[in-house]
Amino acid sequence: MEDGDEQSFVLPNCPFCSSNVYLENDEEHKRIIHVCEECGREYKIYLSDREIYRWRPSFIVSTVDKWAAISMQRRMRNLLGGKGSKCPEGHGFIPSEDMCEDGRDEDFDCGQEGLPKESVDGPRLSIQDEMHLLKEGFGSISSHFEGIIEEMVKKTSDRGLKHISLSATLRGIKSQVRELYNKDSFVIPGDCPEGKGDELDLFYRKLEGPHRIIYGGMPNLRDNHYASLRTLLHQFEFLYEQQKLLSEDPNQFREKYSLSKDEGEELINNFFLPLTYHLKKQDAYDMNRLKGAVINDRLEEKSNSKIHGEVVTGDCSLYKLREIIEMIENFFDDFDSSNLLSENEKSFSEPLYATSVVSHGVDLDQLNFMVFQGLPYSTSEYIQALSRVGRKNLGVVLLWFYPTRVRDDSFYRNFKRYHDSLDHEVRPVPIKRCARLATKQTLTSIFCGGIINYLSNENGKPIYKKGDVKKLEDNDWDKLVEFIKNVYGRELEINVADEIQERKNQITEDKDFSDGRYFPRVLAENGDRYYQTQTGMRGIQKKFVLELSDPNEDIIRKWIGE
C-alpha cells in the first residue's frame, strides 16, 4: 500500500481538527497507522489479529466468538498478561522464548526472541454489550471461554476481571451472570452493594415524566403497511404546518403550545427523522419504493418538498451502516427548518426503514419518532427496538398491528395491560454453564488453550507442537487438570483428569505424525468430533447434508423442463 492512498474507514475524520484520516504504512515498525492529513496526529488503531497480538492496544473491540482463538493461537497470552519482552527491532511484543516473526504470518522475518520477563498485568475490565443474546448453547459455550480468559488473568496478574454487562432485560439477570461469568452481580441503577449511604454509594438522577409515549392502532380498511406510510405523511404535514405557524405568527404559536420560538424549533427538529420498524426485509424495501406515491406526491403539492430515506437491513454492510449513521448525525448541521417554507424544491427528511438490525448498535439521539409495522415476535426484541427512540428527548411510538393476525389482535385488545407489565413479560435468559453437551464440545478447546497459553506461560516457552507436549512432566499435567477445573468452576458430569489423560495419550502415543506436527491437528485426526478445537462459538451442532436421490432428481428435472 502506498502512503496516503487509502482513507480510513474506522476513523474517517480526525477527532481534533475534523480533517480526513488516511492509512500510512509504518515500514520501520511493520504496522499500519492512521494519520490526519491536516494536523499530522497519529492514531494507533490496529485491525489485523497479528498487529493486535504484537502491539497489545489499550482496549480491544471484538466479537465474543473471537476469543475462541485462545485454543489455537499461542500469542493470545500476550493480551492476557503473559511473559515476554519488546522486540529490540521495534516490532512490538514477543512471548517468552518465542520468535518475533518468521515470515509465515507477517510479510517479514525477524529472528529476535522474547525474554522470559514478567509482563504488565492482563486486562482489568470486560464490557459486554447485548448480554441478553448470550443464551442457550451459544451462551454455555461463551461461558467456558469467559472462564479460560478469567483463569489466565488470575494466573498472570493475581486478580480477576471486573465485568460491566449491558442487557435489554433484567429478569433473571443474576442467574444469567452467575452462569455466564460464575460471579455475583448487582444492577445499576440500583442500591449500592455495600448498602445505602455507604461512601461507595453511587448517586443517580431520576428524570420525571415519560420517556416514551406509545400508541397502538389497528387499520380497518387497509393493511398496516399502508397505515405506516400514511403515518409518515401525516407526521410531515403536521410538522410543515407547525413550522409555517411558528415562522409566520410566533405569538399564536406561543399561545397555542406555551413555547418560545427557539423551544418550538427545537421540538420540531426532534421529530424530523422518523424510524420505521419492520418484521420482514421486503416490507422495509417497499416503504422506500412506495414513498413517492403515498408521501412525496402530497408533500410536493403542499410544500414543494419530498423525503428520501435509507433502508437498513441485514443486507447493509458495516460501511454502509456507518454512512447512514453519519448522515443522521450530520442531518441538522446545515438544516434550518424555516427553509421548508421557501419555494425552492428541497429535501424534507431522511427517514430510516429498518428491520431488527437497527436494534443493535444504532444509538442516535436524533431518532425520536418510531412506527412499528406489526408487533415484534418476542417481548425482548420489542423492548430492544423501543430503546432506539427517546434516548435523550421524549420519544413517540406508534404501533400498527396486523389486522388479520390472532396474536396481534390479542395484544391490541390488551394493549395497556401488556405495556404496564412489559418488563415482567420478558422470559429469563436460558443458559446453563455446565450443560453436558456444551462441556463435551469445549473440553478439547479448553485443553488446547490451557497448554498453548497457560502452560506455555508457566514454563516460559511456547508449547504447541506434538514434541513439546511429549516433554511435559507430571507436574505440568497436574497443573492443567486444576486449571481446567477452575475454568469450568462447577462440578462436572465428566472426569476432567480422565479426559485429559485420553487426549494426552492421543498425542504422545501417536505414530503417524512427526514431533513437529501442530498438536491440535493431531487430536483432530482422531475422528471424534469432540476432539476438534473450535474456530468460533456458533454453529457447533453436527452438520448434515440433504441431497436428492437419483430417481427424485430425474423427476424434478422433468418438472422444470430440463
Image: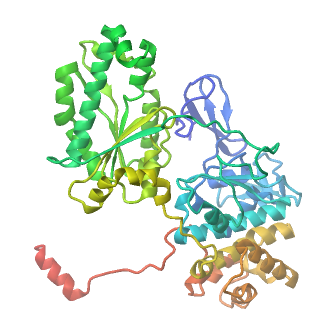
Q: How is the image coloured?
A: rainbow
**In screen coordinates, is 291 left or right of 44?**
left
- Residue ID at (60%, 22%): 17
Residue 314: x and y in percent read 39, 52
Residue 426 against residue 441 in the figure, above or below? above
Residue 197: x and y in percent read 78, 43
Front in this rendered view, residue 130 or 204:
204
| Quadrant, the N terminus | top right
Q: Quadrant of residue 18?
A: top right
- Residue ID at (55%, 34%): 208
| Quadrant, the C terminus | bottom left
Residue 192: x and y in percent read 74, 49
Residue 501: x and y in percent read 74, 88
Residue 91 against residue 525 in the figure, above or below? above
Residue 369 against residue 165 in the figure, above or below? above
Q: Quadrant of residue 550?
A: bottom left
Q: Quadrant of residue 445?
A: bottom right
